[in-house]
Image (cartoon, helix red, strand yellow):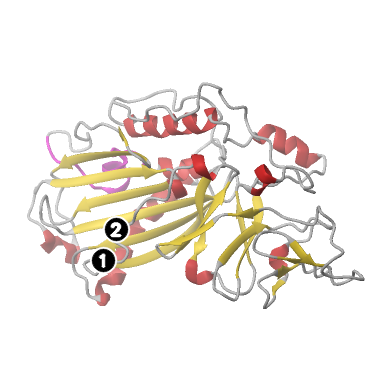
Amino acid sequence: MLFTNVWYVAEFSDNVGETPTGVRMLGRDFVLFRDPDGQAHCLSGVCPHRGARLARGRCHGDGTVACPFHGWRFDGAGRCVQIPSQADPTGDIPAAAQVDSYPVQEKYGLVWVFLGDDPAAATPIYPMPEFENPDWRQIRYADTWACNVHWSKMTDLDHVHLPIVHGINFGGENPVRPPDHQAEQTEFGFRTKIVSTPSVTKGKWKEMRSERTKVVSRLAFMVPGFTLRGEVDIGGMDSGFKNVFYEISTPIDEENTMMRWVFFRSFMLEPENDQEHLKRNLRNIFQDKANGESILPRRAPDVEDWPVVRADREDRVMAAYWQTLRDMRRRGWQIDRVRLEALEQDGDYRVIPSPGRAENPAGWVFDEVPRCAADPAAAAPATRGVA
């Protein structure tokens, strides 16, 4: 299941420059580049002339990216502004010589791209208050996972996996049973929290708290970037010593996901502690990756609810996630993968529709991807909170 009308992270900002960068998202090809003013742009990455990949071309000083095949130049709005072989290279340009251009925002060192045609209806990009706060130390990481975006989320979307996968117990008589918790709707998605008394962490971090101190753990899912935000009171409740992570997932296609993390800590801020902090986070990440890449089926089932069998506290957060997917499907944002695959087998190429198609629906060489029909009663998302 892949969804349009969502803000996705296409790349870290410092990886995008004045040379074309190819990115694959939602099973489609895109090109990122900066104009001479430093503004980042994202275009559909397939030239409408003969289908060449624009990411293989080059940028020019006029803020355009040129196709590697015949040099057709496209500006940041997706318009072809020059065809070198024409008698009048800048004037004799067919109306259909255009590609989709997608809204771009740069926030928190990330290039966010809106992939869809209805930005007004989208969930806005969430705040990341730690990013420019000197009381927090930041490190980041990226990796490609051979699993779909929903399995990448499912590896973290519950509390029970903490003791089973990562060895982080909750204390009490049954240290693998999480405290009672709810999933609560927010402006950006949903959130949950638990209060537990886990064992003291090992190594250098052990000095952060005493044995069986109460610890608050918060987890939030945000639709933009298909992001998980985790926050743990490393030093115990009210200590002010927190570990925060943002896990941002961009679906490459139905079976692969680009994963990016931004980690923050409010303790041991010296740079020499960065590697230890990253090592601790990566230990959990690699364990989750092994799980995500082993889950079957390879593609997330296109059903109204999942999983079929549930445990009382094990699947509450997952239920909230699947409710979010239902909301998006009912608004007509889900790509119809069955119809799309049939079209592609017949030699058709489809693109993610951009906002520009609403203003100019005709004259596009590549039609838009088919999407599942919207539910007329789904003008606004349903309540995501799940008890």
The residue carrying mark 1 is: 133
Disc 2 to disc 1, C-alpha distance: 7 Å
Q: Position of residue 110 (x, y in %)?
A: 46, 62
Whether tag 2 and tag 1 are in contact, CB under 8 A, the answer is yes
Q: Nearer the viewer, residue 41 or 334?
A: 41
Q: Position of residue 228 (x, y in %)?
A: 37, 47
Q: Amino acid at mark 1?
A: Asn
User: In which quadrant is the C terminus drawn?
Assistant: top left
User: Looking at the image, is 89 positioned above or below residue 218?
Assistant: below
Q: Is residue 162 visible?
A: yes
Span shown in magenta: 157-172
Q: Residue furthest right?
A: 87
User: Looking at the image, is 259 positioned above or below residue 180?
Assistant: below
The 10 Å Cα crowd at callout 1, few under 14, some 14 to 19, many 20 or more, is: few
The residue carrying mark 2 is: 129
Q: Nearer the viewer, residue 30 or 342?
A: 30
Residue at left offset 65%, top offset 69% = 20
> Element type at marker 1?
loop
The 10 Å Cα crowd at callout 2, few under 14, some 14 to 19, many 20 or more, is: few
Q: Is residue 35 left or right of residue 60?
A: left
